[in-house]
Image (spheres, helix red, strand yellow):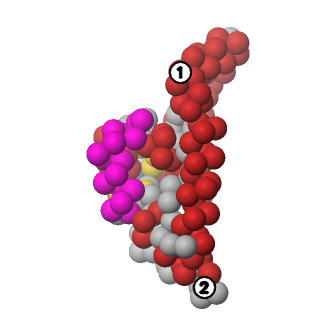
Amino acid sequence: ANIALANFADVVFASKTAKFTYPFAKLGITPELGSSLVIPFVVGMSKAKEIMLGGEWFSADEAKQMGLVSDVLAPEALLPHAVNFAIKVAANHPETNRLIKKVMNAPLREKLDQVLGRELVIFEEALSKGPGAATFGKKSPPKQSKL
């Protein structure tokens, strides 16, 4: 799964063994799925550029320090922790949960459509003119990463 999808989760828990990367620059493409908006919002512009331009892998603990994940747990504790949290949230009135998320998500949601449109245009440009064209035009098997 793409880490950019986690940007829009209400709460993200990670295994201690998890590793993350935003590999856009190394792939010759630009951020997508709202990453250019959400990551600077969460971690700050300087750190966002560091992780986007550098494309290095980082640990779950580093992700927590940056605010990308809420908690880091042992692999065997991850699912029970997530289920327990879901039970707590489900015990709230659904309308209250909806309204809390609505007001908290509003600053990003108001900008997201504009950002997604811009990301798509620039992503397509990277695929047609930039190094991403060569990367994604090849029929060779993908490189295996070492986790």
Q: Where is residue 65 in the image (x, y as percent from the top left)?
A: 31, 40
Name the image quarter holding the N terminus: bottom right
Q: Which residue is drawn at 59% across and 28% down?
A: 110
The residue nearer to you, when weighing 141 against 121, is 121
Q: Is residue 70 left or right of residue 135?
A: left
Q: In this view, does 42 lie to the left or right of 79?
A: left
Element at label 2? loop
Element at label 1? helix
Confirm whether residue 26 shows in the render.
yes
Residue 138's disc number: 2
Name the residue at the right extreme. 94
The residue segment tinted magenta is: 40-55
Q: Where is residue 124 in the image (x, y as percent from the top left)?
A: 61, 63
Q: How crowded is mark 1: few (under 14 residues within 10 Å), some or many (20 or more)?
A: few
Q: Is residue 36 magenta?
A: no
Q: Where is residue 47 in the image (x, y as percent from the top left)?
A: 30, 47
- Residue under label 1: 104
How far apart marks 2 and 1 lie (CA) works out to: 42 Å
Q: What secondary structure characterizes most of the magenta part?
A: helix
